[in-house]
Amino acid sequence: MDIKKIVEEKIREFKESYKFELKNIEVRDVNKYIEHTNLKATATEEDILKLCQQAKEYNFRGVCVNPSFVPLVKKQLDGTDVKLVTVIGFPLGATSTKAKVEETKIAVADGADEVDMVIHIGYLKQKNYEYIYDDIKAVVEAAKVPVKVIIETCYLTDEEKVAACMISKEAGAAFVKTSTGFGTAGAKVEDVNLMRWVVGEGMGVKASGGVKTYEDAVNMIKAGANSIGTSSGIDIVKGR
């Protein structure tokens, strides 16, 4: 596979034909889009237990936590349809592929239903597309559960966003995700719409970072998101 050629062709198509466009749809059941998230360095077990209880109460799509909390969350969500999501190579993405693979294996063995991995942003920016592809592919093969690739849009040009999404798709990821929430900015509807255009309708797009209100969530969904990572899920479903 010539991943460089695939990326360059998609970037050329983007420059020639991409157009921002929100879907004219009625958004229902916003709660089923939300991955209730607490990835703070200061999060305690008490905080995570509260997160799980809220996710069950509001029937959210999932709970997203750091890997050390996966066994605890697994017990709390047992018997529910709330997905257990964790993060890999978080938040910088610059750990080695081997480290990401081992972290993934442990997380899945502990009970993770999905894993959100961060790409190596520096290698993407220097156009080392082969490294990015191999890094994602290795995690996908190790996980055997859906993998979301966090591309950290705030640091990327539009062309780099296209490249990151196209490589993620070719490497077998299930989703692309906007942000860690630890960068200089979070999700934007323009980025979500571009990401949806790149990956097509057969792949997921997760909007994450700075989605705080019901209006924010609806706009992300209209832009193409089918998952929303947020710590403001309760405010969103209450229409605040």
Image (tube, helix red, strand yellow):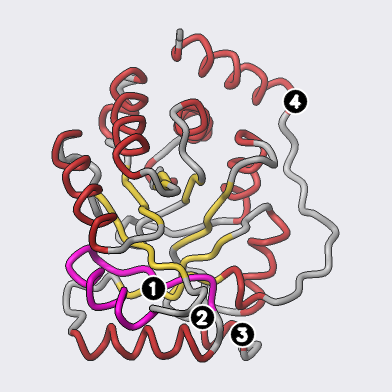
Mark 4: give few (<14), some (14-19) or many (20+) Cα within 10 Å.
Answer: few
Q: Are marks 3 and 2 in contact (CB under 8 Å)?
A: yes
**Mark 1 vs mark 4, CA separation in Å:** 36 Å
> In the image, is 190 to the left or to the right of 98?
right
Q: Are marks 1 and 2 in contact (CB under 8 Å)?
A: yes
Q: Which residue is mark 2?
A: 233
The type of residue carrying mark 3 is Val
Which segment did they paint magenta?
60-77
SS state under label 2: helix
Q: Magenta part mainly helix, strand or loop?
A: helix
Q: Which residue is mark 3?
A: 237
**Tag on residue 17?**
4
In this rendering, the label closer to the viewer, 3 or 4: 3
The type of residue carrying mark 4 is Ser
Mark 2 or mark 4, earlier in chain: 4
Mark 1 or mark 4, earlier in chain: 4
**Mark 2 vs mark 4, CA separation in Å:** 35 Å
Task: Name the residue located 28 percent from the left edge and 70 percent from the top edge.
Answer: 39
Check if residue 62 falls in the magenta segment.
yes
Q: Nearer the viewer, residue 85 or 215?
A: 85
The type of residue carrying mark 1 is Thr
Q: Are marks 1 and 4 in contact (CB under 8 Å)?
A: no
**Mark 3 vs mark 1, CA separation in Å:** 15 Å
Task: Name the residue located 19 percent from the left edge and 49 percent from the top edge.
Answer: 103
Mark 3 or mark 4, earlier in chain: 4
Q: Which residue is mark 1?
A: 37
**Mark 3 vs mark 4, CA separation in Å:** 36 Å
